[in-house]
Amino acid sequence: MRFLVVDDSSTMRRIIINTLHKLGHQDVVEAANGREGIDRVTEGPVDLIITDWNMPEMNGIEFIRSLRAMNGQQQVPVLMVTTNAAKDDIVEALRAGVNNYVVKPFTPDTIREKIDAVMAR
């Protein structure tokens, strides 16, 4: 499986990538914002996207809406990992096309459970 991790924090990208590696997922590409995320998707297929919400240039919601508008990208699973914990934020993310939602801080077990849940759909 090929993962795309989109987060403006290089530290958070590293934490998520290290978590994925520990879970046995070695094929991971990264992007620092939604625009770079769209570029990575056009460079080659990804099987699951993990994205932050709050990023410069193109935030996570804008990224997901752009992704879902792209030909062939409507079904790619998206897991949002963010500090936005308000119910309204979660509803907005789900309406934009997020498949599951994790509030920071998180544990590796939480990431594994959410990935498993998204991939089971």
Image: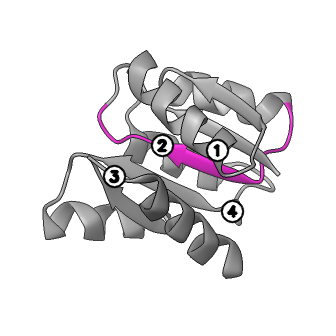
Q: Distance of mark 3 from mark 4, alpha carbons?
A: 27 Å
Q: From the viewer's side, name the closer residue of 121 and 74.
A: 121
Residue type at tag 4: Gln
Residue type at tag 3: Phe
Q: Secondary structure at mark 4?
A: loop
Name the residue tied to disc 3.
Answer: 106
Q: Are marks 2 and 4 in contact (CB under 8 Å)?
A: no
**86 lies above or below 20:** below
Quadrant in the picture for residue 35: top right
Residue 41 rendering spot, x and y as whole percentages: 74, 36
Q: From the viewer's side, name the closer residue of 49 and 22.
A: 22
Name the residue tied to disc 1.
Answer: 22
Q: Give, as a single range, the part of the protein colored magenta.
A: 44-54
N-terminal-most mark, 2 or 4 = 2
Q: Distance of mark 3 from mark 2, alpha carbons?
A: 14 Å
Mark closer to the observer (2, 1)? 1
N-terminal-most mark, 1 or 4 = 1
Name the residue tied to disc 4.
Answer: 74
Quadrant in the picture for residue 12: top left
- Which residue is at 83% across, 28% downward? 43
- Which residue is at 75% across, 49% downward? 24
Q: Secondary structure at mark 3?
A: loop
Name the residue tied to disc 2.
Answer: 51
Residue 63 rendering spot, x and y as whole percentages: 50, 40
**64 lies above or below 42:** below
